[in-house]
Every structure is written in structure tokens, then in C-alpha cells.
Image (cartoon, rainbow, N blue to C red):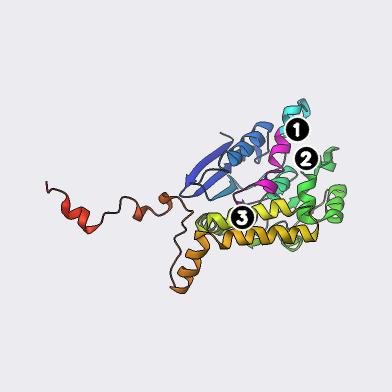
Amino acid sequence: MSLLVQREERVLRITLNRPEKRNALTAKMCADLAMRIEEVQSDPEIGSILIDAAGTVFSAGMDLDEAAHEANHYKLNSHEGLFTIGAHAAKPIVICVNGPALGGGVGLIAQGHVVIAAQGALFGLTEIRVGLWPFSIYRAVEAALGPRRTLELSLTGRVFSTQDALAWGLVHQVIQPFEVDDRASAIARDLARASPTAISAGLEYVRRSRGLHAREQGELALTLRAKVMSGDDFTEGVIAFKEHRDPRWPSMPPSAYPESVNEESPETAESEPAD
């Protein structure tokens, strides 16, 4: 299977699983990955998505063998669906970069809301080397790196380091390779435990505020802030903070707090007949 999908408590982990092909992205992988992310957007049992890769390479980009034979609309649509998904996702996406990422691999990284990379990983928009341009991923990478840097990297096809990726904002933390999966997993778990109401409203603000004038952005911020502050999660968060305890978010599904499910009161337990 080119993708491995498993649920770990409230985290959906999706693993690129073509290590023998350096996790090169086929059209089907792109479509399936986008579908897996899309189908949990309204699932209250999932709080975050973690994308990682098997082997020592995160992704070498698109599968050139496939691309050389077919350039159909299915491919273009599958790429468009994947390489824009971070901009409208309602669940936070964490990406664990365990090794080199080129071309489409960089485009996938640009979909992450939080990106953790292993020290020594290399990055590059190398499509120019095979007579191509990074059309499908360009907008997402430009949003992460800025227009002038993205243009230069696309023109030169040069490979850059984790320290450059960190300084330019493509990744957010650089970790020793043996720690990178643990750190990314911990962040994904923490995000999944955060207030669903706050996460949802925050990402809604990010999506809807793009392209608005400053006044409209401010009005949207005030509207969403008032909505969140009048809700039960904010009330619980303030109380929990004052009581020095972890909050129990009312918007969280009951399964997130398994100790409270089927919890019996002393009266109920006493009323049950003995065996």
C-alpha cells in the first residue's frame, strides 16, 4: 500500500509508504491523500492529522515514470486537491519530515500548519532540471516562502538545507533525526487535545481573512472572538486555569475522556444486585 493510515487516539496518522521509490508521489497517492484528509474534516473523533514517511526520504516529488506517460486531467485534479488542502483544512495538519523532500514533496510540506524536520534533510524545487516548472505546488510554496525566493528556487533548482528551510519559514522546528517522529507525534497529540471550538474558529479566521481588507479582517476577528468567548469551552478554560488543572472541553466528544464514559455513581452501584 502506498499510504498507511491509522488512528492513534485523536490523531489520524498518514504515512507515505513507497520507500523503494523514495516516496515519489503518484496521481493516485495524491488523490488518496487528499481524500483521507478531506473525509475527517467533519469527524469530531479526529483532532489533528499527522503526515510522515517510511524510509529515509520524505518524498522525491512526483513519480517521473508515471508523469512521462500520462499528463491527464485526473493527475492535474488530484494535484490541485492535495496542494491546496492546507489552505482550507478545518483540522490542523502536522508534517514530520524525516529526510529529503524535493518538488512535490516540498509542496506537500507547504500544506502543513506545523512542520517538524530532521536535521540534515534537504529541500529543493528541482523540476527545472527535468525541463518542467513546479506549476501545481507553486502557489502553496510561494505562500510559505514568499514570491521572490520561490521564483529563485524554481529557476535555479538548487537544493537548500534544513537551516535555510527553518529561516525561510518552510519548516518550524529542526530536530535530531532520532527525535523527529516523537516530537511531531507529541505536537499532533497536543493539538488534538486542544479545544475543538478554538481550533475550528482559529482556522476559520485564517481561511476567511485571506484577501480581506484590514477593516474587514478586524470585523471578522471581533465576530469570531465574541463567539468563542461566549462559548462553554472558554468558560471551562478559564475555570481550569484558575484551578490549576487540565480543562475538559465541552466541545470534545465523550470518547476523548474515556474515564467519564459509563462512570457509575455510588448510588447506582449500590442498587445493582450482587452476583
Q: CA distance from mark 3 to mark 1?
A: 31 Å
Q: Which residue is mark 3?
A: 201
Q: Residue at x 55, y 42 (%)?
A: 40
Q: CA distance from mark 3 to mark 2?
A: 28 Å
Span highlighted in magenta in the image: 78-100
Q: CA distance from mark 2 to mark 1?
A: 8 Å
| Disc 3 residue type (three-letter) | Ala
Question: In the displayed structure, does residue 250 sit left or right of residue 224?
Answer: left
Residue 6 % position (x, y): 50, 42
Q: Which mark is residue 213?
A: none
Q: Nearer the viewer, residue 193 or 195?
A: 195
Q: Residue at x 59, y 53 (%)?
A: 200
Q: Is residue 51 magenta?
A: no
Q: Nearer the viewer, residue 95 or 9?
A: 9
Q: Secondary structure at mark 3?
A: helix
Residue 188 visible in the picture = no
Q: Which residue is mark 1?
A: 76
Q: Which residue is mark 2?
A: 136
- Closest to the camera, between mark 3 and mark 2, is 3
Within 10 angstroms of label 2, few (less than 14), some, or many (20 or more) residues?
A: many
Q: Residue at x 73, y 54 (%)?
A: 209
Q: Earlier in the sequence, mark 2 or mark 1?
A: 1
Within 10 angstroms of label 3, few (less than 14), some, or many (20 or more) residues?
A: some
Q: Secondary structure at mark 1?
A: helix
Q: Residue at x 51, y 47 (%)?
A: 46
Residue 193 % position (x, y): 50, 57
Q: Nearer the viewer, residue 211 or 100?
A: 211
The reply to whether callout 2 and callout 1 are in contact (CB within 8 Å) is yes
Residue 47 vs 221, above or below: the answer is above
Residue 68 % position (x, y): 78, 29
